[in-house]
Image: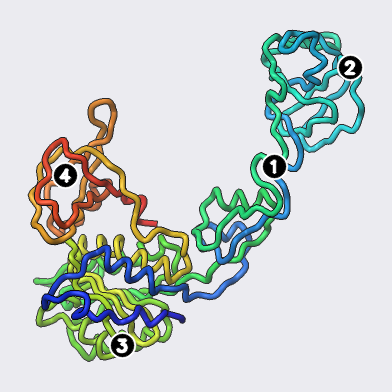
Amino acid sequence: MVLRVSFGVMNLTDCFRAPGALIPLDQALDFLAERLEPVTGVEDVPLDLACRRILARDVVTGVTNPPFEASAMDGYAFAFDDLPEPGGGATLRITARIAAGHAHHGVFAKGEAARIFTGAPMPAGLDTVVMQEQCREKDGLVVLPAGARRGDWVRPAGLDVVAGDVVLRGGRRLRPQDIAMASSVGCAVLPVRRPLVVGVFSTGDELVEPGQPLPEGAIYGSNRQGVLALVRALGCDAVDLGNIPDRLEETRACLAGAADRCDLLITSGGVSVGGEDHVKTAVQSLGALSLWRLALKPGKPTALGHVGKAAFVGLPGNPVAGMVAFMLVARPVILRLAGATGEPVRPVRFPVRSRFSFDKEEGRRQFIRVSLRPGDGGQPEAHLFRTQESNVLSSLVETDGLVDLAEDVRQISPGDRVDFIPYADLLW
């Protein structure tokens, strides 16, 4: 695994003069973007296994597509100059039938046309097509309506790509349309990055596995399963490492044992300042923390660093805080380590109109959960979930995305423009 300076150890005293100052989210993301490099090798996979994988190198096409002029419609092909007057109607004799996949090499005399079908190569000498719905055919003749223009319904060669073009850039996560493009230029296999191996722990004596009896004072754990699902959605190999009890030596042993077999370790809980929060201490004894305590709500205790050779992300223990911190911080870490260099570190935001009032504390960037509903004129409007508490998972289940409120924002009123990030852009 190659981590440039293993995240690089940020000297927080140099960056922030005030003791205990929180790290702005944008500064943390810039720091990560500058230092993280792909850590996985490259393998060739067939197209049917390549979707959602990360392309390792540019794909340069060796073919032009389409490789010939082709009809864009079922209809009749003819030479525009054969019309008695430009754009006028005409009656022409049909002397050929050309279907897709079949080239015609005959010569057309003046006044002759071809019955042609979508995708069929245009024969030499013919340059215009009129769609069949506008024509009448009888006794080997076709009556063309007035109004045709030279080149109508003809696809030029190279309309899509030309031999030598880069059709797919390395570093992109392959989508279905990318697979289709690769196939269209004759690629049977693609060079992709090996999936990142991500080990996921939860922490806490209070956590019980789903399906087990629930003792007094305990809760069912949700964080680990949620993070595992998020990791898998990003195309990684997710390793379920179980739950670590609230004991320092066990925390150290679990992290140390997993570091040699994973590219990245993710924990939930144990990174705050409570008496039973041992993850931060364990990580520092086994490696280093590069970033800790972000100016982010929810998600302030988020930590980043390395354990041995493995990168490390520590997420907060509250379920919503952990998932939001994953979306905003762990996701770009994973994508960079996995080789997705073409992915933006920051998600795209969309302006929408607020339909709520909200008072915000100054100094921390806050991401609040909202639903979108059509307002006046069908334009989307953001509706605030009933609570923004960081332990209420229903606030993620029943909403559509996050509204990003900058550090200096103090209040949002109905009608204000706010920046909205859909979950769809954060969860894959």
Given contact means CB atoms under 8 Å apart, are the residues at marks 3 and 2 in contact?
no
Residue 428's place in the image compared with 153, above or below, is below
Callout 3 secondary element: strand
- The answer to whether 255 appears left or right of 20 in the picture is right
Q: What label sits on residue 124 in the rendered view?
A: none
**Numbered circle sitting on residue 158:** 1
Residue tagged 3: 287
Q: Secondary structure at mark 4?
A: strand
Q: Amino acid at mark 1?
A: Gly
Q: Amino acid at mark 3?
A: Gly
Real-space CA distance between mark 3 and mark 2, rounded to the nearest whole angstrom = 82 Å
Q: CA distance from mark 1 to mark 2?
A: 28 Å
| Amino acid marked by disc 4 | Leu
Name the residue that disc number 2 marks: 110
Q: Residues within 10 Å of mark 4 (few under 14, many from 20)?
A: many
Between discs 1 and 3, the one toward the N terminus: 1
Q: CA distance from mark 4 to mark 1?
A: 49 Å
The residue at which mark 4 appears reads as 384
